[in-house]
């Protein structure tokens, strides 16, 4: 409860975007012992039918090329595991600790070894395997063209993203957070601070702090405060495939092939996808499934890596979007240097769902304490963009 009486249009924190990132921010803020203010979350589509959260592959890994991403995902997995235990009587969140298997050919093996050393240093439980070892561990998989494999032995897997979103949203609402259906249409900045938020229905809400958690719309929201960021919507298609010999793929992890094609179990089926070639990956906000991507790239790679995948059929498919940070494929997190009460939680480039716990906690600490204290995430701040100092994440799939 707030310490002082405020009008219905006055909030201590307004969060634009109520999917998994915005809801996580609200959840962590509302339960922080040093915060007792009012929080408003504005979400234009409470059904979440076309948001990146519900259309994602909902997987989590620790195998990254930058230490900051390893540390965030380590925290995220432990957080998801705690929800799974907390909600076991309700079915949990569908968490499967199945691991990630990254495969590399001759050209990628050195890169895999380099990342492995960084990941181990950060405490990730990863193993490197030669082709002969992979063949014994996964007899259903062809190791033709594989020089090395990197496997998450624990702390990696997949889950139900919508269940996590509901956990954050319902928990925040129970703590007094208001969720409002609406669309941000304008931001009023005066004297170096964001003073109020205008919605498309003409209503206006004053705020002490503002969090941009608008996913693919993040750049448009930032522009309303005369802030430029290059975050673009990039379409990613997910295909659900049925295989008659699925039972033979014992202990199948999330596999990222050297071709870039991925697949993992999903119930009795599998899901699969691939990032399009860079010259075929335009800014795109439609939700049309590119079936040619499956026929021309995905299926041939699947059949080559797993022989029984020669006989498969697509039983479902959908398209979602990455909020792709063109600058360095890493998120922008924390306050803007000139508009100090404008906070970014944007540009996850496909990793927002798995990093949502670390981001929500960090935003709450930025607002309450002035810095991200539990994990030092300062290198992901806006300053790196202003100073042209990218923090490159090379492991983007």
Image (spheres, helix red, strand yellow):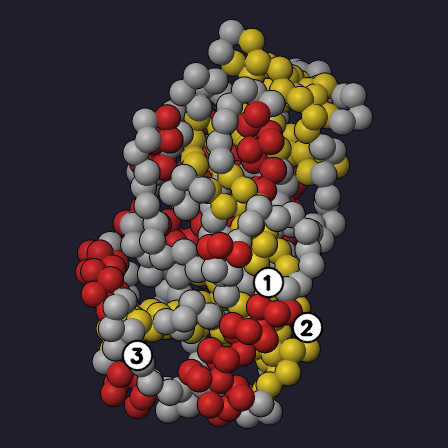
Query: Mark 2 — residue?
Result: 316
What kind of element bears circle 2?
Answer: strand
What kind of element bears circle 3?
Answer: loop
The answer for how far apart the CA atoms under marks 1 and 2 are is: 11 Å
Query: Mark 1 — residue?
Result: 237
Q: What residue appears at the point 32 percent right and 38 percent down from the top-left corner?
A: 390
Query: Mark 3 — residue?
Result: 146
Mark sitting earlier along the chain (1/2): 1
Residue 388, by quadrant, is top left
**What is the quadrant of the N terminus in the image?**
top right
**Residue 163 versus residue 291 in the image, above or below:** above
Residue 263 in the image: x percent, y percent? 49, 73
Q: Which one is in front, 320 or 345?
A: 320
Few, some or many residues within 10 Å of mark 1 (<14, 14–19, 20+): many
**What is the quadrant of the C terminus in the image?**
bottom left
Mark sitting earlier along the chain (3/1): 3
Q: Which one is in front, 73 or 136?
A: 136
Q: What residue appears at the point 43 percent right and 35 percent down from the top-left corner?
A: 333
Callout 1–callout 2 Cβ contact below 8 Å: no
The answer for how far apart the CA atoms under marks 3 and 2 are is: 30 Å
What kind of element bears circle 1?
Answer: strand
* Residue 368 in sight: no
**Residue 291 versus residue 377 in the image, above or below:** below
**Residue 225 versus residue 45 in the image, above or below:** above
Few, some or many residues within 10 Å of mark 2 (<14, 14–19, 20+): few
Q: Residue furthest front?
A: 279
């Amino acid at each position: 409860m707030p310490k002082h009486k405020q009008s219905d249009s006055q909030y201590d924190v307004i969060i634009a975007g109520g999917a998994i990132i915005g809801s996580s921010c609200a959840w962590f803020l509302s339960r922080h012992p040093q915060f007792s203010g009012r929080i408003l979350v504005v979400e234009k589509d409470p059904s979440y039918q076309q948001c990146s959260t519900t259309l994602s592959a909902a997987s989590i890994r620790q195998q990254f090329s930058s230490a900051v991403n390893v540390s965030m995902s380590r925290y995220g997995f432990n957080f998801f595991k705690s929800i799974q235990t907390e909600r076991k009587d309700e079915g949990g969140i569908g968490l499967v600790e199945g691991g990630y298997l990254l495969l590399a050919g001759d050209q990628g093996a050195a890169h895999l070894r380099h990342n492995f050393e960084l990941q181990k240093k950060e405490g990730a439980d990863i193993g490197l395997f030669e082709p002969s070892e992979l063949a014994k561990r996964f007899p259903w998989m062809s190791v033709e063209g594989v020089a090395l494999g990197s496997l998450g032995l624990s702390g990696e897997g997949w889950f139900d993203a919508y269940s996590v979103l509901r956990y954050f949203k319902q928990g925040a609402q129970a703590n007094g957070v208001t969720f409002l259906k609406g669309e941000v249409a304008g931001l009023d900045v005066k004297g170096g601070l964001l003073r109020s938020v205008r919605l498309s229905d003409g209503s206006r809400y004053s705020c002490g702090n503002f969090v941009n958690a608008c996913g693919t719309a993040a750049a448009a929201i930032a522009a309303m405060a005369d802030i430029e960021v290059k975050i673009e919507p990039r379409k990613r298609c997910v295909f659900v495939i049925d295989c008659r010999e699925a039972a033979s793929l014992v202990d199948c992890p999330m596999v990222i092939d050297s071709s870039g094609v991925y697949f993992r179990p999903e119930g009795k089926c599998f899901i699969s996808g691939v990032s399009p070639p860079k010259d075929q990956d335009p800014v795109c906000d439609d939700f049309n499934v590119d079936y040619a991507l499956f026929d021309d790239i995905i299926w041939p790679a699947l059949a080559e890596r797993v022989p029984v995948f020669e006989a498969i059929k697509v039983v479902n498919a959908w398209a979602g979007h990455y909020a792709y940070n063109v600058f360095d494929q890493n998120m922008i997190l924390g306050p803007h240097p000139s508009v100090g009460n404008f906070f970014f939680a944007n540009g996850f480039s496909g990793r927002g769902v798995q990093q949502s716990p670390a981001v929500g906690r960090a935003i709450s600490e930025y607002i309450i304490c002035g810095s991200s204290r539990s994990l030092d995430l300062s290198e992901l701040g806006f300053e790196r963009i202003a100073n042209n100092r990218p923090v490159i994440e090379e492991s983007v799939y």
